Image (spheres, grey):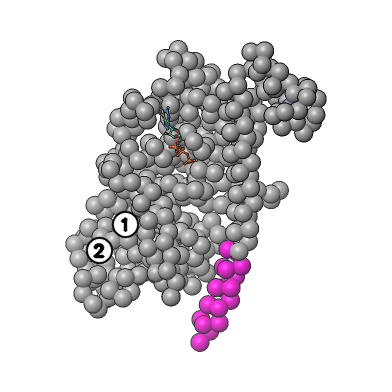
Amino acid sequence: MTTSKPKQAALHKLAHDCHTADTRGDSGRSVPIACDHHKDLSPPDRYCRQGESIARVTAVDRDQYTVRNSEKEVPAKLTGKAIHSSASSVDLPCVGDWVSVRYHDSGAHASILEVLPRKSFLRRRKPGAKVEFQMIAVNIDLAFIVQSCYVDFNVRRLERYLVITSEGGIEPVILLTKSDLVSPVELEQLIARIRDAGISARVIALSNVSGNGVDLVRELIEPGKTYCLLGSSGVGKTTLINRLVGGSDLTTSAVSASGEGRHTTTRRQLIVLEQGGSLIDMPGMRELGMLGLGEGIDDSFSDIQAYLHECRFANCTHTSEPGCAIREGIANGELDPEHFQNYLKLKKESEFHEMSNLEKRRKDRAFGKFVRSVKKGKGRQDRH
Ligand SMILES: Nc1nc2c(ncn2[C@@H]2O[C@H](COP(=O)(O)OP(=O)(O)OP(=O)(O)O)[C@@H](O)[C@H]2O)c(=O)[nH]1
Ligand SMILES: [Zn+2]
């Protein structure tokens, strides 16, 4: 997103004459104050107009936004102007965006006027033949790509994540979790496989159980920077985040947004870490890795595929059917029952996520409808 020339002229640097809504008084009017926006918030471009201030989008739930400045977090609505100026849904405010806002009702809520230029983005391709993207989050400095040393490890999926981060201008660091479940030799082999694939990104092995390696991650967190964790379900992201958040439990950090008779509770999608950096964590992000997980599964479980082809019945459930190659393999000690259980578990997860992709598509359609309806309504108002 770029700002046009005339607009740029109307903007002024936010350095010493920063304006913010006077959230202490009851006037709701804008007063110049010493700028304290940037204690833990550092927008890429410190611009705002008279009466406007800069905030960061911390949660998006359909048309409900939550924005935060250094003082507090409030619900926000998109102005018609902001909707009009966005060419497509990827330009609309997204978690991590710096936006110019105007506060109302003594700072109780805000309207979003403009999205400031983004410095990086995380997007995914929408399912379907047409090349369309969905913005997941923006302004991320560093992405931790998380895989488990145990079961989940898959170099091809790692590569896919690296493509996504490099396209979006985000620095990647690979985290191999559950190092307590493999031997040092096995761990070295995994890292060698990553290097053999030509991947040069930093790799940190860690265990959430013993705590080994967690400090190396902590050391990378800097105040004013934004991070995210990408990875499949069950690799230990939540466990790690809870360690990084330090004390405050992630699951309890919900924000309340009440607007126009509706009261909703949205899970905060951008949280502040103990060290002062911000972490973006949201369901859509976790599902990124699920694109094509099916393939990944068949890759790392090719031995099981071979057994599956041998079962007498194509729809064998491997529980009681005669001629089941899986059960035979387990019985004669050729196939590790735990390996098979892991296969079933991941298969179930990937099917689950494919289902939720369908739901996402349904939601996308609903969103398109919403934008069109707002545009129509606003268009009428503007002509007054
Ligand atoms: N042995 C071992 N277990 C771990 C480690 N990290 C996480 N776990 C366990 O793995 C399971 C999944 O961990 P989560 O943190 O919920 O994984 P997640 O990536 O957040 O999964 P989703 O919430 O589904 O996205 C839990 O039972 C954790 O206790 C680790 O380093 N070693
Ligand atoms: Zn079978």
The residue at the point 77 percent across, 33 percent down is 315
Give, as a three-letter code, the residue at label 1. Arg
Q: Is residue 295 left or right of residue 38?
A: right
x 31%, y 42%: residue: 245
Percent across and percent down for residue 351 are: 64, 41
Local packing at callout 2 (Cα closer than 10 Å; few below 14, some 14-19, many 20+) is many
Helix, strand or loop at label 2? It is loop
Query: Secondary structure under badge 1?
Result: loop
Q: Which mark is residue 18?
A: 2
Dot label at residue 46: 1
Q: Does residue 371 appear in this view?
A: yes
Number of disc labels: 2
Looking at the image, which residue is at 69% across and 29% down? 319
The answer to which of 91 and 248 lies nearer the viewer is 248
- Magenta span: chief secondary structure: helix
* Residue 132 in sight here: no
